[in-house]
Image (cartoon, grey):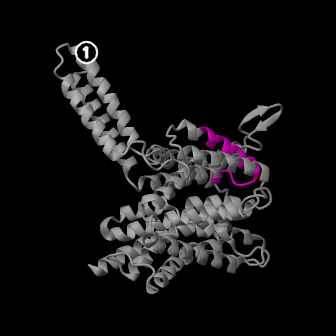
Amino acid sequence: MSIFTKFGRVKHFHILSQRGHNFLQAPWAGGIVLVVCVVIAMLLANLPATSHLYHKLLHMELGLWVDGKLFPESMTVEKFVNDALMVVFFFTVGLEIRRELSHGELSTPKKAILPIVAALGGMLVPAIIYTAFNFGTESISGWGIPTATDIAFAIGIMSLLGNRVPVSLKVFLTALAVADDLGAILVIALFYGQTPNLLLLGIAILIMVGVYFMRRMGEFRMIAYLIPACIVWILFYYSGVHATISGVAMAMLIPTTPRYSRSYYLHKADIIERGLREADKIADPNRAEEERLYHIHRMKQISDGAESMSHRVEHLLMPYVNFLIMPIFALVNAGVHIESVDYFNIFEYSAEIGSIGMGIFFGLVLGKPIGISLFSYIAIKLGIAERPASSSWGLLFAVACLGGIGFTMSIFVDNLAFDMATQLDFINKGKISILIGSTVAALLGSALIIALTKREK
């Protein structure tokens, strides 16, 4: 093989590597990966060659056997994904909420009022629509399913639309989705947990109080937060409160202030820079290199200390959440076994069962945009909030349609709303309705944004 051929292969690999890096950095990449995983899950669940193995794998026991008992108790592959891996997802959601509350779009009453009011409307109206279709029936417990917004998909679609969406509306939808996530977490904690074991829950709360005071005393080592987080997760798992809530609770305790102040960082950086210049003057090359490495290492330490632990952990976890945990969640939860084409008839109604399909579909496609727009309109007309700059009411409604993309959170609530043993058909019907409703909401929102921006231009 000639050196030119080798060079060509190296160059080709570098180009592919760069393109892969660019793809992972794109805000819409996570959504594309999720869609692909949904398709794969549906194929695995329905192809004759893979269906049995797929469902057998999901219910396979996973954990450690201690004295003849499984630890954690009743843990399967599916439960591990939903109750353990998803804790990391909820932990990053908690970090995002904490960031927005500390110094983001929810940090002051003036900034927070519109997205919080809009999120409230975007949860209440879908819940009312679902209840209207299912009041007094077996499926009424699914009212929380259409109340959630998938922030990753919504932001991904807005990024694909480019500058058609004003920056103010992008910020509005992002802040709304964060507030919506907080609302969904409260719904899960208050309405979709079991009767809690107060002793275990009390111990978990005492540990979190201890972590809070530890943070107030200036503890910045990650291990000091990681160990209590694992213990709190186990206590939540056995207490009856959904284990993923522990991820949000612990995220709120992660320090948001850096170890070193800005002035201290600049002072130390100046000293290190002088040290590097002095190292260049050393005649002995070995000693000069040692000095340079020492100062570079010190600069890294100072730089890490100038960034808050919360920010550092969020950026560290985000690629794993978007491209590992969420795809695994989709592979495990989107694989609905379609026994007949009737599964896609989400508009059927029964006096005993109601209509899970219509409740979720119309809750996402109509309830979300109507609730978000109506509550925003009321807040703005009352003078307690301001309309996002450079936006019309029509464009605000179009962006609100993207709030109807439920997907991740909606599927998660769907798994909690119904009993896996006796209401599996309800769960599967809910998932199909979520996928159809989220797709229609995404297409409707995108079409309205394109049409309105063309007309305005």
**Residue drawn at x 78%, y 78% as measured from the top left:** 136
Q: Residue furthest right?
A: 68
Q: Is residue 52 above or below residue 104?
A: above
Asked if the magenta segment contains residue 244, the reply would be: yes
The residue indicated by pointer 1 is 287
Name the residue located 70 percent from the left edge and 59 percent from the top edge. 416
Count of labels in the image: 1
In the visual, does 243 lie left or right of 16? right
Q: Quadrant of the N terminus?
A: top left
* Residue 418 drawn at (x, y percent): 74, 62
**Residue ranking furthest to the bottom:** 381
Which residue is drawn at the image coordinates 56% and 50% (left, top)?
253
Viewer-side residue, 44 vs 384: 384
Which of the image's four quarters has the C terminus? bottom left
Q: Position of residue 120 (x, y in %)?
A: 56, 73
Main SS class of the magenta portion in the image: helix
The residue lying furthest to the front in this view is 217
* Residue 87 appears anywhere in the view: yes
Quarter location, residue 111:
bottom left
Front residue of this view, candidates 271 and 121: 271
The three-letter code of the residue at mark 1 reads Arg
Whole-percent x, y for residue 364 in the image: 56, 72
Residue 54 image position (x, y, % from top left) = 66, 45
Q: Residue 406, can we see it?
A: no
394 up-or-down from 325: above or below: below
Q: Is residue 292 magenta?
A: no
Q: Residues within 10 Å of mark 1 (few under 14, many from 20)?
A: few
Point out the stretch of residues depicted in magenta: 227-245
The residue lying toward the viewer, choosing from 188 and 35, is: 188
Residue 341 quadrant = bottom right
What SS does tag 1 mark? helix
